[in-house]
Image (cartoon, helix red, strand yellow):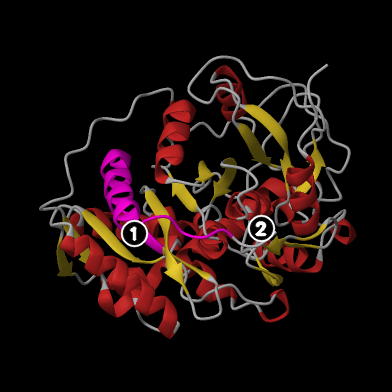
Amino acid sequence: MAPPLSTDLLTTAEGLNAFITVIARPGAGGRGPLSGVLVGVKDLIETAGIRTTAGSRILATYVPRRDAAVVRALKRAGAVMAGKTNTHEFAYGTTNDNPHYGATRNPWNPSLSTGGSSGGSAALVGAGALSLALGTDTAGSVRIPAALCGAVGLKPTTGTVSTRGVIPLSPTLDCVGPIADSVAMAARALEVLTGRSLARAPGVRGLRIGVAEAFVFAGVHAEVERRVREALAALERLGCKLETVTIPELALCTETGVTITRAEAATWHRHWFPARAADYGADVRAKLEAGTRVTAKEYLTARETQVRIARALRRVLREVDLLAGPTVLVPAFPNANAPLAETYRLTYPFSIGLLPAITVPCGFTSAGLPVGLQLAGPPRSEARILAAAAAYEADRGPLPRPSP
């Protein structure tokens, strides 16, 4: 019989309310690049014989017959599933304050939010209970909670990791990505999820890093800005060249992304909404209702604007190698007064542009809350992004873990 999960892991997960379903005796992993690695899988990703609730009442008893493509990839690589991690209901939010399964707690301060919607995955990795978990990212749902919980979070180029068997939020923008305790683990996971080895990236010396100063530092929390600027200075010491860039189209990202997501989410949920509206939490119910009012003209206009934003980003990324800035404008916050627009304003652009982006921890506020540095690049530039993040991580040195 397979050994049970460790008491420490289960105690941490329970304290953080990070699992919706625990796989008490997960079995042994096979041979492969993730042999024996315990992995948390966001409860939006289908698992054969194990319920997949999407954090909802509607799918509370749904048990898929097949694994999602990413779960099959993990198993082939020898990984072992520890459980299904808590998520914002149907991944439609950035707090992980779930009305059906309870809010996930931030490992650095349990009274604060993890961010979402992959909050359970980020909490377990940030706490040091797991070294790897899977999340999904539509507007920043891998990067936001990873940044707020002190983990590495990678959003790959949209379309490079299969979403087959993943319950959708916005099929145009959805993707799956790893949340990890190091850049190296995120890179290993990406190779497993794509089935391809990463190209060997050159060193970071001479790398041109663009900073859209007027956009990324507007309204940012003072301590977040301080830590991110310190990280940028470290990259400069490593030989990178910082350049100020201007991308006016970034101001259009939030409205564009919200319109696309609302319309597509409402379309996917039409079998249950509004017929079962009472089974949804209040915040998701309100968003789905808003989605039913998005007109065809508004949706098509948003898709046209998406193309405009993507072209602007790619144009700038022909002049610089990477873009950088904070991942989230603010540190972790209480769910009761969550600054929602401030959580996804800086992550939405790379979702809309379908571009790869990573968040890597870059220190703490005076209250001991993690801050994330975001790096993004042109399509399929994951090797370059990971190389820059790894160089910074090595220069930064190890960070402390939160107290149990």
Q: Is residue 380 one of those drawn in magenta? A: yes
Discs 1, 2 touching: Cβ within 8 Å: no
Work out whether mark 1 precedes mark 2 in sequence or the reverse, and give the earlier one: 2
252 up-or-down from 351: above or below? below
* Residue 36 at least partly seen: yes
Which residue is at the front of the view, 138 or 191? Answer: 191
Q: Residue at x 63, y 56 (%)?
A: 117
Judge from the rendering whether residue 81 lies leftward or rightward of residue 190; answer left or right. right
Label 2, residues with CA under 10 Å away: few <14, some 14-19, many ≥20: many
Label 1, residues with CA under 10 Å away: few <14, some 14-19, many ≥20: some
The residue type indicated by label 2 comes to Tyr
- Quarter holding residue 284: bottom right
The residue type indicated by label 1 comes to Arg
Residue 153: % across, % down: 48, 50
Residue 92: which disc? 2
Residue 17: % across, % down: 78, 55
Q: Residue at x 68, y 24 (%)?
A: 67
174 up-or-down from 367: above or below? above
Residue 195: % across, % down: 43, 22
Image quadrant in which the N terminus is located: top right
Which residue is at the front of the view, 352 or 292? Answer: 352
Residue 396: which disc? 1
36 up-or-down from 234: above or below? above
Judge from the rendering whether residue 21 lies leftward or rightward of residue 85; answer left or right. right
Image quadrant in which the C terminus is located: bottom right
Q: Is residue 70 one of those drawn in magenta? A: no
* Residue 220 at least partly seen: no
Range of residues picked out in magenta: 373-401
192 up-or-down from 379: above or below? above
Judge from the rendering whether residue 329 lies leftward or rightward of residue 30; answer left or right. left
